[in-house]
Image: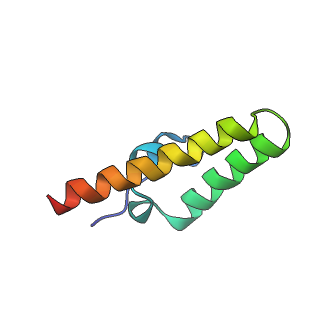
Amino acid sequence: MARIRSKHSNLLNYFIHDRRDLSPAYVRKCEQFLYNLRHKGLIKKKEAAGLFKQQAASNKRALTNKRA
């Protein structure tokens, strides 16, 4: 499958597409940004965990859709 083109200043693709379809540099930058938000106290640990759970859930949905 072709890679999804993503602007590095936009997190939308990080949450709606499977990580395997995104460039490794884009995924790394998104995760670093979310990590920095959490560690600077801008979001709480629970909120950060929720964001990562959303990404995991979207990955699962993408996998089941591809298999169907």
Occupied quadrant, residue 9: top right
Tell me the residue at 62%/61% (across/down): 28
- Looking at this view, name the residue that lies furthest to the right: 40
> Between 61 and 29, which is closer to the camera in this rendering?
61
> Between 40 and 22, which is closer to the camera in this rendering?
40
In the rendering, at what x and y percent does residue 23 appear? 48, 63
- Looking at this view, name the residue that lies furthest to the left: 68
In the rendering, at what x and y percent does residue 14 appear? 49, 48
Q: How is the image coloured?
A: rainbow
In the rendering, at what x and y percent does residue 49 appear? 64, 44
> Between 1 and 61, which is closer to the camera in this rendering?
61
Answer left or right for 49 relative to 12.
right
Is residue 6 in view from this perspective?
no
Is residue 40 in view from this perspective?
yes
Tell me the residue at 61%/51% (across/down): 30
Quadrant assignment for the N terminus: bottom left
Tell me the residue at 30%/53% (across/down): 62
Tell me the residue at 49%/48% (across/down): 55
Answer left or right for 11 relative to 63.
right
Occupied quadrant, residue 39: top right
Quadrant assignment for the C terminus: bottom left
